[in-house]
Image (cartoon, rainbow, N blue to C red):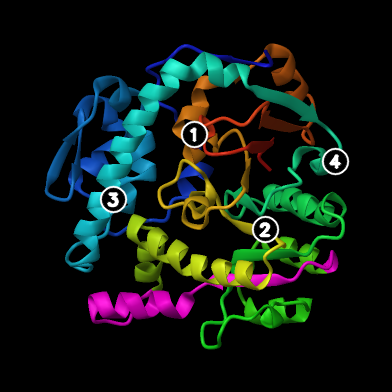
Amino acid sequence: MNKTTCVMTSLVLLFSAAAYAQVPAKPFLSNQARILLRGGANKAGYFELGNMRLKLPPAVMKAHGADLMLSHLSLQLDPNVYPSYGPKNDARILRSIQRFIDDYGTFHIKAPEIAANIASRVIKGRVPYRAYLPQNAQNLYLGEVHNVPGLAAEIENLVRALPEAYPGRKIYLATEFLPAFENIPFSVENAVTDPREIAQLLEGTPRASTRVLNAALEAGIPVIGLEPETAILQEIVRETSSYPTPEMYEEFATSFEGMRFRNREWSKYLRALRAAEPDALIVVYAGFGHVGYSEDFNLSSLLGGRSFVVLFTTPEFLPLNNPLFRYLRETPDIRGQFRSSPDAKLVEKWKKDTGLKKIMGTDMTVILHAR
């Protein structure tokens, strides 16, 4: 067994400043939420969600109150600004917290089985992605933590390896990091094939992800933008009767209702792409919150088909990707190999397919040192 499971601990994870920076600042937080964010989760014993007071099982509240604050309560929508979406968003947050409680219980029952079925390997050179990726995949989902340059560089390595991993097969890269062409009917003929077009579409918007898009084009992989920026703006105007500020846009786009809205819009483009290219490998490059099996309204559940999800992350962000990751601990030799080099990558993959991946969220995880 390459992986052992540590016993449950009541220690609340102390997130790094970088981890907090990944959660957009929100203008609307309840007083109780602010207490939790300051570290009062263990004392409070409950959450305030809209006009509800939500009491969690003590073990969950003690271990994961701060986790759920960052991943759920910080994504509330102010009902004074979003009168329709605010209550709907609260209801989705509530359902997601309830699902996490269920997953928490299942995880601790199944922990030995999960640990025994995960193969871990430290790689200090290039990851041999061809050996890891399934040949029969229809949809390959690459989930990242945003704006971490080292992660984007590693995703670039995978993208460059795709033509060799899938010889003779048509490949498309669809991504949230490029706006969709919303005013014209979808066509594969409109896919981006020239780096100059990416530069034009993202002018003045520096992103670590851009190197991945350019690498795809250099590898002969057309790129399709998914982000429906105009549709998001129109939806906010319809809901608020005012033109959205950048803060309003970010608040809605990263809320539970906003993520659902965006994924449903993305799905329209991805279904059209599948209809046009039934045998192609469709690679979706986005934040893990859009693609992880453990995430609500994730793309694989919306689209179906044979999916394979890869998470690119760092140790600091693992509990934000899924709080349950914190209970898994590598054996001392694996930890020693990983810590021995800043270029080391910890690659984890299920030894056999299992329904438990729905709880953990991935088929494969690539963990890099924070840079």
Tell me the distance, in whole angstroms, between the alpha carbons under discs 1 and 2. 25 Å
Q: Are marks 3 and 2 in contact (CB under 8 Å)?
A: no
Q: Quadrant of the N terminus?
A: top right
Q: Does residue 42 sit above or below 33 in this rendering?
A: above
Q: CA distance from mark 4 to mark 2?
A: 20 Å
- The residue lying furthest to the bottom in this view is 184
Whether residue 37 is visible here, answered yes or no, is: no
Residue numbers of the magenta segment: 218-245
Mark closer to the observer (4, 2): 2
What residue do we see at 60% from left, 49% from top?
Answer: 144
Q: Which mark is residue 92?
A: 3
Q: CA distance from mark 3 to mark 1?
A: 21 Å
Q: Which residue is mark 4?
A: 126
Query: Does label 4 or label 1 sit earlier along the sequence?
Result: 4
Q: Nearer the viewer, mark 3 or mark 1?
A: 3
Amino acid beneath label 1: Pro
As for residue 153 lying within the magenta part, the answer is no
Residue 17 in percent (x, y) is at 49, 42
The kind of residue on which mark 4 rests is Arg
Residue under numbered circle 2: 283
- As drawn, the residue found furthest toward the left would be 51
318 relative to 57 in the view: left or right: right
Q: Quadrant of residue 79?
A: bottom left
Closer to us: mark 3 or mark 2?
2
Towards the viewer: 318 or 231: 231
Q: Which residue is mark 1?
A: 319
* Amino acid tagged 3: Arg
